[in-house]
Image (spheres, coloured by chain):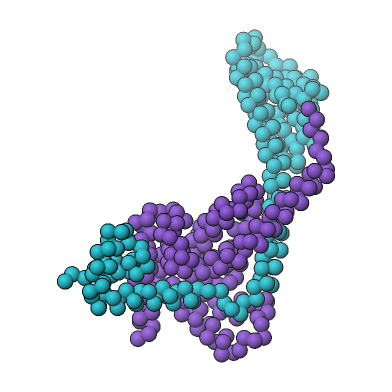
């Protein structure tokens, strides 16, 4: 007589075999004392695991539950505050992304536009200008480039080593700059519009 | 369109949400704690994980509207959290119950003999479960201790029923051998 393997007996002891296999093992175990003892041993082991895994009777559950509830509440409040701050940062990032996209478009347009090239560059009449996007957030055009500033941080939208010919800042929320490459005389017009 | 929010209505909504949260915690806290405790094996870690699970769940208000579905969903989060914990820590780490109960103040009725018995029992289970992998341990606890059907265990562990059966068989064989060796 061939005995079922220990895996089959272990699974059958807890009723975890598919119907056909379960029937086969059941049939064998009914007539095999050795396998019946094996199955009993598995069932006893499961029983021991069940008994030992109970919550210790000595555990002061009420105190523990109260502590957990307080910590959960605290965690939720902290999470809400963090989420609020993240939301603010996201809004700033979204605006910056729009500004960068518009700027890129403006740069591409500037490169493609047929401007007269000149190697003679006059000193820029305006060297800096800024416009407020909203309280605390500014777009600034300087010889170093165009930057978005706000909340103590700066996002360089463009930085060029060329000379700035003109810089403009409008109250409607846009800044513009004309950059001239001192080597090639190439003029780049950048306008950043913000909403 | 008038988008002005009525403060009273907003306050009522907030109160309602808080009440729902409190009820949700009351109804599920013990069950989830016990489920995690069984898998990680000590009160301090079970407490931390339980709190994390509830915070994570309650941040998704939309998921807790249906109580039955929410309870099931919460169990799954708890199982995943416990398995992740076991993987990170490599094994179960039972500690003396007396140690973790110190700040909670155990009842005076617990005699020194009971305390010894308790720590021996915890150490015994620790040794046995240490032999199992995280998934074997989770399968054994969910199937044999929690009494979940193997289909549900498979869902919780994100694997097939055949794989779960394999985990259960391995776990039972290892645990049984451990008990027999200790007995001998």
Please state, as top left, top right, bottom left or bottom right, where the N terminus of chain A lies in the image: bottom left
Residue B34's place in the image compared with B68, above or below, is: below
Q: Position of residue B6 (x, y in %)?
A: 82, 40
Is B115 on the left or on the right of A1, as rendered? right
Instruction: Name which residue lies at 81% across and 35% down.
Output: B4
Residue A90's place in the image compared with B157, above or below, is: above
Q: Position of residue A177 (x, y in %)?
A: 71, 22
Instruction: Name which residue lies at 81% across and 23% down.
Output: A171
Q: Position of residue A183 (x, y in %)?
A: 61, 20
State the residue in front, A42 or B93: A42
Residue A159 seen by the camera: no
State the residue in front, B86 or A43: A43
Shown colour of chain B: purple
Please state, as top left, top right, bottom left or bottom right, where the C terminus of chain A lies in the image: top right
Quadrant housing residue A86: top right
The chain displayed cyan equals A
State the residue in front, B177 or A132: B177
Is A184 on the left or on the right of A194, as rendered? left
Instruction: Name which residue lies at 44% across and 77% down.
Output: A48
Residue A115 seen by the camera: yes
Residue B173's place in the image compared with B56, above or below, is: below
Instruction: Name which residue lies at 57% across and 54% down.
Output: B68
């Amino acid at each position: 007589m061939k005995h079922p393997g220990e895996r089959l007996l272990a699974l059958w002891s807890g009723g975890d075999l598919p119907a056909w296999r379960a029937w086969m093992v059941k049939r064998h175990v009914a007539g095999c004392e050795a396998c019946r003892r094996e199955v009993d041993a598995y069932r006893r082991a499961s029983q021991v695991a069940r008994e030992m895994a109970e919550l210790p009777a000595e555990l002061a559950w009420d105190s523990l539950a109260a502590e957990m509830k307080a910590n959960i509440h605290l965690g939720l409040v902290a999470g809400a505050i963090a989420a609020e701050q993240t939301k603010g940062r996201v809004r700033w990032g979204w605006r910056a992304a729009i500004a960068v996209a518009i700027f890129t478009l403006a740069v591409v347009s500037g490169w493609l536009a047929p401007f007269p090239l000149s190697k003679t560059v006059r000193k820029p009449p305006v060297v800096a200008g800024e416009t407020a996007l909203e309280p605390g957030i500014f777009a600034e055009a300087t010889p170093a480039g165009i930057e978005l500033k706000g909340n103590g941080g700066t996002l360089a939208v463009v930085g060029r080593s060329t000379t700035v010919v003109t810089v403009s800042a409008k109250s409607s929320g846009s800044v513009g700059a004309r950059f001239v490459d001192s080597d090639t005389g190439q003029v780049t017009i950048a306008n950043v519009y913000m909403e | 369109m008038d988008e002005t929010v009525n403060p009273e209505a907003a306050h009522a909504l907030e109160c309602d949400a808080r009440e729902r949260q409190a009820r949700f915690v009351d109804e599920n806290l013990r069950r989830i704690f016990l489920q995690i405790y069984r898998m990680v094996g000590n009160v301090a870690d079970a407490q931390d994980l339980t709190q994390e699970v509830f915070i994570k769940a309650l941040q998704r208000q939309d998921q807790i509207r249906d109580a039955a579905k929410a309870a099931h969903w919460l169990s799954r989060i708890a199982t995943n959290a416990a398995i992740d914990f076991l993987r990170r820590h490599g094994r179960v780490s039972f500690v003396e119950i007396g140690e973790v109960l110190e700040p909670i103040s155990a009842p005076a009725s617990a005699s020194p003999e009971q305390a010894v018995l308790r720590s021996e029992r915890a150490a015994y289970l620790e040794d046995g479960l240490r032999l199992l992998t995280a998934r074997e341990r989770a399968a054994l606890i969910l199937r044999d201790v929690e009494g979940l059907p193997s289909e549900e265990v498979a869902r919780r562990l994100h694997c097939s029923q055949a794989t779960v059966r394999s985990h259960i068989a391995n776990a039972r064989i290892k645990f049984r051998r451990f008990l027999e060796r200790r007995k001998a």
